[in-house]
Image (cartoon, rainbow, N blue to C red):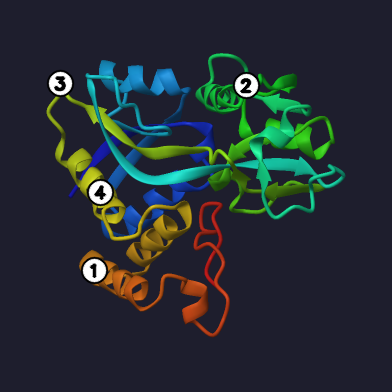
Amino acid sequence: MKGTIRIGFPSSLASYTLPTTISAFREHYPQVKFQLKQGSYNKLIEGVINGDFDMALIGPVPKQEMKVLGTTLFTDNIVALLPTTHPLANQSSIKLGQLRDDSFVLWPKGFILRDIIVDACGQLGFQPKVSFEGEDIDSIKGLVSAGLGITLIPEITLVDGFPRSTVKIPIIEPAVTRTVGVIISRERKMLPTVRLVKRFLFQIGSIPDVKSPTIFSWALYYAFCSKSFTISMTVFVALIILSTDINSYFPWKFSPPVKIFGVGSPI
């Protein structure tokens, strides 16, 4: 299989999901080339509709846009990132309402991640007090690391570790999540290479219990390691059946699988 596929992606998937997917896919189909372009949520949808992208990785997966077809790959938790000096920094989990008096570091208005966070706070009857804004994940992390506020951030953006002087804490009551997936146009015929990549992602996303970034990354890792996608997925599913906790099944501890393009290798 040969060809070039144009993929759009958001900054929140740039250092983990996208490079992991491409490295695993190219292990099986090395002659397929990629053109990659980062974009905002609305620009990614517009790009797929207008034909600028063959597909886009996106989060959350749009449900109301009739001109694109979305496939959900996993659900990503939105977690709190706090300075280590924060009064709640030692908690195992926190309720979102406990942050109502904090200063938030968020994306500017119009960014989908800001909308998700503001909506979640609104459900509890408060609006986050925004002290600083940043347009990308790294600037948000840096501002929190400097002690200039707290933020809520997709957990998948922290797989390589936390910024200095920060801690990650799960949010409960309510749990805040977003779907992550891929979109293609409903109005254009899919090219063979696009169909191949979509099928590759869909096979991984449809494996039983593939519902979190950690499990999804393990599926990609097995796809990367084995020349036979069927064999690699069979091995992976067997691991899930044998144990729902991969780390408890093996005598050594695994870390998230992917450092090749910015995501860690196992062991």
Distance from the alpha carbon under mark 2 to that under mark 4: 38 Å
Distance from the alpha carbon under mark 1 to that under mark 4: 16 Å
List the single residue furthest toward the left: 189
| N-terminal label among 2 and 3 | 2
Distance from the alpha carbon under mark 4 to that under mark 3: 20 Å
Q: Amino acid at mark 3?
A: Glu
| N-terminal label among 1 and 4 | 4
Quarter of the image where the C terminus is located: bottom right
Estimate how packed mark 2 is, as few (under 14), some (14 to 19) or many (20 or more) residues with alpha carbons within 10 Å: few
Q: Considering only vertical position in the picture, is 200 above or below 47? A: below
Q: Amino acid at mark 2?
A: Gly
Q: Position of residue 196 (x, y in %)?
A: 20, 46
Relative depth, front residue between 50 and 172: 172
Residue 217's label in the rendered image is none
Kindly identify which residue carries mark 4. 202
Q: Considering only vertical position in the picture, is 222 above or below 154? A: below
Q: Considering only vertical position in the picture, is 156 above or below 9? A: below
Kindly identify which residue carries mark 2. 125
Frontmost of labels 1 and 3 is 3
Answer whether labels 1 and 3 touch (C-beta < 8 Å): no
Q: Amino acid at mark 4?
A: Phe
Answer whether labels 2 and 4 touch (C-beta < 8 Å): no
Distance from the alpha carbon under mark 2 to that under mark 1: 52 Å
Residue shown at the point (31%, 70%) measured from the top left: 226
Distance from the alpha carbon under mark 2 to that under mark 3: 41 Å
Kindly identify which residue carries mark 1. 228
